[in-house]
Amino acid sequence: MKLSDKLANLMNAQIGNEMGAAMQYLQIATYFDARSLPKFAQFFYTQSAEEQAHAMKFLHYMLEIGAEVHIPTIEAPVYEIADTAAAFQMSVDWEHEVTEQIYALMDIAVADRDYASQTFLQWFVTEQVEEVSSMETLLEVVNRVGEKNLFMIESYLERTPEEE
Ligand SMILES: [Fe+2]
Ligand SMILES: [Fe+2]
């Protein structure tokens, strides 16, 4: 099974997108860690590790089918985070964007009749449903509770089971 050049290029780009997400979430984690909100920080450290794992999934898949891995330049994360709601809004937007990136990969795999890649990408389609949903839930909770009562969400996060 050989990847089309188009799909290979886009998968390499996706390795960069996932690593970019990992760095953005790491940056957000430091925002919370510096403000003594350890559960928020932990949530984003975990998200960051998950994004790196996503990049590794692409990398290993490409190697497995004999495609060349070219890790692209990764853009620096956004450092300016206005407040907690902004951090979660940024994350929700990002996850929607990633969902579109995964769909674009899937579109090519379908056009290529590349069934192996379709099966591989299906995992990410399902994962994105989960990621968008959990970020949207947290954004909603943050908006409801407000910046002054963030400690309440700390205990909420403590009750939220770890993913995967
Ligand atoms: Fe991801
Ligand atoms: Fe994600």
Image: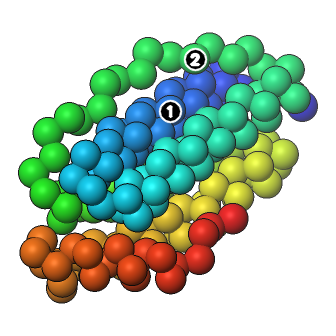
- Quadrant position of the C terminus in the picture: bottom right
Secondary element at tag 2: loop
Q: Is residue 23 left or right of residue 46?
A: left
| x, y percent for residue 31 | 25, 46
Q: Is residue 158 above or below residue 88?
A: below
Q: In this figure, which colouring scheme has been used for the structure?
A: rainbow
Q: Is residue 141 left or right of residue 120?
A: left
Do residues under tags 1 and 2 come within 8 Å of each other at their CB atoms? yes
| x, y percent for residue 73 | 44, 15
The residue identified by callout 1 is 19
Tell me if mark 2 has few (under 14), some (14-19) or many (20+) residues whose alpha carbon lies within 10 angstroms of its own.
Answer: some
Q: In which quadrant of the rendered view does residue 2 lie?
A: top right
Secondary element at tag 1: helix
Tell me the kind of residue under disc 2. Ile
The answer to whether any part of residue 111 appears in the image is: no
Q: In which quadrant of the rendered view does residue 39 lie?
A: bottom left
Tell me the kind of residue under disc 1. Met
Label placed on residue 71: 2
| x, y percent for residue 7 | 64, 31
The residue nearer to you, when weighing 42 against 47, is: 42
Q: Is residue 85 left or right of residue 154?
A: left
Q: In which quadrant of the rendered view does residue 132 lie?
A: bottom left
The residue nearer to you, when weighing 43 against 151, is: 151
Tell me if mark 1 has few (under 14), some (14-19) or many (20+) residues whose alpha carbon lies within 10 angstroms of its own.
Answer: many
Label placed on residue 142: none
- Quadrant position of the N terminus in the picture: top right
Q: Is residue 70 above or below residue 131?
A: above
**Residue at the extreme front of the image, as rendered:** 36
The answer to whether any part of residue 22 appears in the image is: yes
**Which is closer to the viewer, label 1 or label 2?**
1
